[in-house]
Image (cartoon, helix red, strand yellow):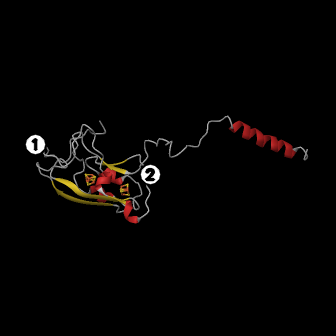
Amino acid sequence: MPVLEPIIELGRGLFTTLRSMFEKPVTVQYPEERKPVKPRFRGRHVLKRYENGLEKCIGCALCAAACPADAIFVESSENSDEKRFSPGERYASTYEINMLRCIYCGFCEDACPTEAIVLGDQYELSFTDRKQAIYPKDMLLEAVAASQLLTPQKTEPGKFTRSVPEMKDPQD
Ligand code: SF4
Ligand code: SF4
């Protein structure tokens, strides 16, 4: 009956409202509450360290070569046992990523021979100036843990000659 139709529709609407009152809320009270990201999420980059605090980055610039957005700039310098930043001959004396150019494709992560650059779970990136979007090495480098030493370190001569560590074959 056409007269009853609006009343039925009103009842259905009220029922939907009533039902949603007992459902678990889907909204998150950000920033107090942060939803964990998915394991495959690619966020802000982090330059990793080894357990002893040495930097994994050896300044090879393969990440910059692989980057389709030309977002990475790397300049390398020589290590010495007196002043060592990373294992091997060289380290990244300059490492910058332009976060406005980055498309978070993860190619830099894939190209890195030492697993130094990792796209982490940090997604809070905001700038008020274009220059602020260029993240320098000190912003990207992982903080040292209590058990780690800061770089540069004075190391035992001949101990850290290998730039790329021996790694397990992922196929094994
Ligand atoms: S995630 Fe992609 S676009 Fe961003 S810096 Fe790495 S390679 Fe370049
Ligand atoms: S992050 Fe990796 S690929 Fe990029 S310069 Fe450092 S070691 Fe080379």
Q: Quadrant of ligand 1?
A: bottom left
Q: In this picture, is 9 found above or below 93? A: above
Q: Is residue 125 left or right of residue 73?
A: right
**Residue sitting at 14 percent across and 50 percent down?**
83
Q: Position of residue 37 (x, y in %)?
A: 46, 43
Mark 2: give few (<14), some (14-19) or many (20+) Cα within 10 Å.
few
**Residue sitting at 41 percent across and 46 percent down?**
121
Mark 1: give few (<14), some (14-19) or many (20+) Cα within 10 Å.
few
Badge 1 is on which residue? Answer: 156
Q: Is residue 150 left or right of residue 15?
A: left
Q: Position of residue 132 (x, y in %)?
A: 38, 61
Q: Are marks 1 and 2 in contact (CB under 8 Å)?
A: no
Q: Which circle marks residue 28 in the picture?
A: none
CA gap between label 1 and label 2 equals: 40 Å
Tag 1: residue type? Glu
Q: In this picture, is 75 found above or below 121? A: below
The quadrant holding residue 160 is top left
**Residue sitting at 29 percent across and 53 percent down?**
138
Tag 2: residue type? Glu
Q: Position of residue 65 (x, y in %)?
A: 29, 60
Q: Position of residue 135 (x, y in %)?
A: 34, 58
Q: Is residue 35 left or right of residue 90?
A: right
Q: Which circle marks residue 124 in the picture?
A: 2
The single residue placed furthest to the left in the displayed view is: 157
Q: Secondary structure at mark 2?
A: loop
Question: Where does the C terminus fall, quadrant-wise?
Answer: top left
